[in-house]
Image: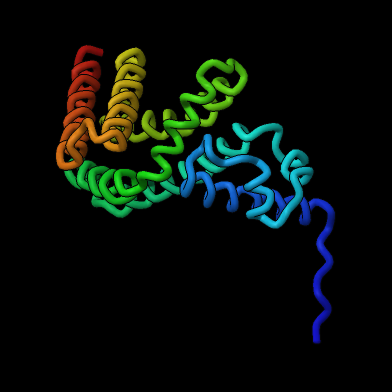
Amino acid sequence: MAARKVLTRAESQALTREELIEAAERLFYANGYHATSLAAIAAEAGRTIGAVYSNFDAKEDLCLEVLRGWGSKKLSRLATAIASTDGSVEERLAAIAHWWDTQLMSEDAALILAAEYGISVVRDPEQRAAAVAACERFVETGRVLLVEHLPEGTAHSQEVLEDAVYGVLGTAVGLAVGHVTELTPSERSTTILIATVEFWLRRLGESVSAS
């Protein structure tokens, strides 16, 4: 019988951190951000409260790690979906629409958690800055996707590009909030998002012509 591998200190800490994140994700999704305590997360993971504080400074940090992992998976699936198209605008928009329907709008627990977390840190400058930094990957992904629709090597207005990125992102956030609060009809959400992307693609095209 092979001897059980003895983990190094770094490996053991990484394993503990992963187990805490997985436990936090289960409890946050099931019970919500505010109803979930660090003590409950520690118990769910089979760890001590000391183990939690050895890896995370506060509940906000642990929640942000859960959301960062969720967002990374969603962005990876979006990139895969777009890469599998023939590269045309129509195919890419269809891929984005399918991703929005199946990967985001079907994830109510994660969307609600993101909203709860956002509200909880809005008055804390340090935590708010951490949340903004975590969202930068979404911003950069949007920027890359929009530029890829432009003719290679063409000049475009950087100001219009930034407006486009934040215009699409702001619309997506609003639609996500509208979805979980049932203010926006689910059947209209995808149509509105794609129409917004198409609008900004046209504006970018106009800025290329002007340049």
Q: Residue at x 30, y 21 (%)?
A: 167
User: Which of the 4 image quadrants contains residue 147?
Assistant: top left
Residue situated in front as seen by the camera: 125 or 45: 45
Horizontal placement of 149 versus 136: left or right? left
Q: Residue at x 24, y 51 (%)?
A: 86
Horizontal placement of 49 versus 76: left or right? right
Q: Residue lying at the far bottom in this picture: please name it.
A: 1
Q: Residue at x 65, y 41 (%)?
A: 38
Q: Residue lying at the far front in this picture: please name it.
A: 35
Residue situated in front as seen by the camera: 138 or 104: 104
Q: Is residue 187 above or below residue 127?
A: below
Q: Is residue 148 above or below residue 128?
A: below
Horizontal placement of 29 versus 163: left or right? right
Residue 41 location in percent, x, y? 63, 47
Residue situated in front as seen by the camera: 162 or 207: 162
Q: Quadrant of the N terminus?
A: bottom right
Residue situated in front as seen by the camera: 107 or 74: 107
Residue 18 location in percent, x, y? 65, 52
Horizontal placement of 57 versus 209: left or right? right
Residue 94 location in percent, x, y? 20, 46
Q: Is residue 6 visible?
A: yes
Q: Residue at x 34, y 29 (%)?
A: 173
Q: Quadrant of the C terminus?
A: top left
User: Which of the 4 image quadrants contains residue 174?
Assistant: top left
